[in-house]
Amino acid sequence: MAEIKIIKKQTELPKLVKVAAYTRVSSDKDAMLHSLSTQVSYYSNYIQSNKNWIYAGVYSDEGQTGTKSKRNAFQRMIQDAKDGKIDIIITKSISRFARNTETLLQTIRELREINVDVYFQEQNIHSLSNDGELLISILASYAQEESRISSENSLWRVKKNFSEGKIYGGKNCLGYKIVGGQFVVVPEEAEIVRLIFNLYEQGYGEDKIAKTLNNNGIKSYFGKLWYRSSVRGILTNYNYTGDLILQKTYRENHITKTTKINYGELDKYHVSNNHEPIISKEQFENTERIRAERLSKNHKVTFTLYPFTGLLRCGVCGRSYKHKKNKYLEYWVCSTYEQLGKAYCNSKQVRDDVLRNATCQALNIDEFDSHKLDQLVSQIEIFNGNKLIFKMNNGEQKEVIWETPKRSDCWTEAMREKARLDGMKRKKKSNIGGNK
C-alpha cells in the first residue's frame, strides 16, 4: 500500500517594511533647530530599533511652515516613496505634515495610490485605514483653522504696535542697530551712509558708487561687496531721515504667507521724529528728485521674463545671472561680473542656446520645454570649466559639461553673407595697400 505524507507549506518569512520619518520646524532659530535635531535623533533610533523595519531615513525641513507645499525634504520624500524606497512614513502630527488641508489630502491620496501609509503619532491615525482619510480631513481642517486664528492674533499685535508708532520686530541696517525697539545710530556706519548720499548728489551713479566703495575696501552690511541694488537700498531708505513709515509690506494670507508690497491695500503709518536722523529730509528729497530726473532722461526700461530668469546662480560668487543680447546672440552673464568686473568675479558668460541644449540633456528630452524646466528644476549653478549643476525640485542634482561653441554657429544666412562680403573687402583693401 502506498504511503502518503503531507508536505507542509513553508512558512513565509515576514516582509521587512521600509520606514521613514518626516520632521519640520517653522523657524530657523537656534531653539527650533535644536528641537529638530532632537526629533531626527528620536526617529532614527525609533525606526532602527524595530527588527521588522528597514530604516529609510528621516526627512527634515528647517524654517518651513506647514502651509507650504514646496518643501525640499518633503518633496524628496514623496518622490522616494513613488520610487519604491518607502512603505510607511511616520510623523508627529497632522500639523507637522501640513496645515493646508488641500495639500495634506492631495499628498495622502497620492501615497494611497501606491500603497504607502502615513502614520500620525499624536492622532494615532493610519492613512491607509478605512476611516483614515475622513479623520485626517476633519483634523486637518481644525489645524488649518488654528493656523488662521494664530495668524490673525499676530496681525492684531502688529497693527496695534503700528498704530502706537512702534516697530514690530525689525532688523538692524547699515547705520542703525535696534535696541529695545528703537533705532540707535552706529557712528562709523552712519558715515558710510552719508558718503553714499553725498556721492549720489555729486553725480555718481549707483554702479560707480558701488565700485568706489569696493575699491576703497568699504564693506556693505554683513561684510559683503557693494552692488547696484545695495546702494539703491541705502538711497531709498526713508528711515535715515529719522522718520518711519510702518506697514510698507504685508502677508497675503495664512496659507501662502507671501510677503507683498503695500500699495494701499492696508493703512500705512507715518511716525515723525522717531529716532536720530543720519541725513536730513532735504537731502533725501533731493536724492529722490535726482533719481526721478535720471529715470526720465533714460528710455523706459521693460522687464522681460525669460525661461531661465531667476534660475541661474554663479558658482564663483553666488550672484544671479542676467540676460543680455547683442546683434549676434543671446547670452547670460553674472551680475557681479557685469556690474563690478573681472576683478570681483572671473565667471564666464553662457550662451542661451547652450543652456537650452544642456537642459535637454539634464532632463533627457529631445526638445527644450520651458514648462518642464519650471516644473522640474529649482536652480542651475554655473561654474568655470563649462560645468552646470542642475538642482532638481526632488532634491537630485545633475551635472552637465558643455563645449564652447563658435560664435558663427548661431549666425543666420544673412549674417554669414555679410561676413563673407566684409572679408572680401578687407582682403581687397589689403592687396591695394600692398601694391603701393
Image: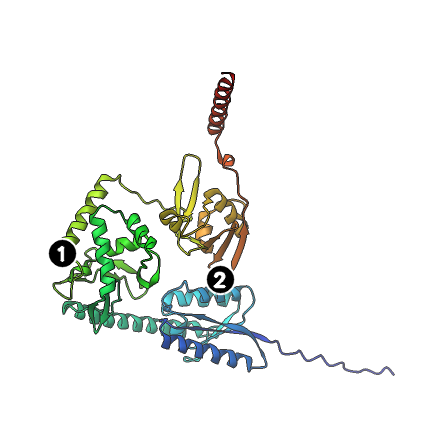
**Percent x, y of residue 297:** 22, 39
**Percent x, y of residue 214:** 33, 54
Q: Amino acid at mark 1?
A: Lys
Taking the image as shown, residue 359 lies to the left or right of residue 212, namely right
Front-most of 358 and 138? 358
> Nearer the observer, disc 1 or disc 2?
1
Q: Vertically, is 289 above or below 126?
A: above
* Residue occupying the far top of the picture: 436
The residue located at (48%, 79%) in the rendering is: 41
User: Helix, strand or loop at disc 2?
Assistant: loop
Provide the residue designation for mark 1: 281
Disc nearer the start of the sequence (1/2): 1
Q: Vertically, is 63 above or below 385?
A: below
**What crowding class fits label 2: few (fewer than 14 Cα within 10 Å), some (14-19), or many (20 or more)?**
some
> What separation in Å lies between label 1 and label 2 (alpha carbons)?
49 Å
* Residue occupying the far front of the picture: 436
Is there a contact, CB below 8 Å, between mark 1 and mark 2?
Answer: no
**Residue 14 position by quadrant:** bottom right
**Percent x, y of residue 230:** 30, 55
Taking the image as shown, residue 28 lies to the left or right of residue 401, namely left
- The quadrant of the picture occupied by the N terminus is bottom right
User: Helix, strand or loop at disc 1?
Assistant: helix
Q: Vertically, is 190 above or below 7?
A: above
The residue located at (28%, 50%) in the rendering is: 209
**Percent x, y of residue 399:** 54, 54
Q: Is residue 228 visible?
A: no
Q: Amino acid at mark 2?
A: Gly
* Residue occupying the far right of the picture: 1
Residue 96, which numbered label?
none
Provide the residue designation for mark 2: 395
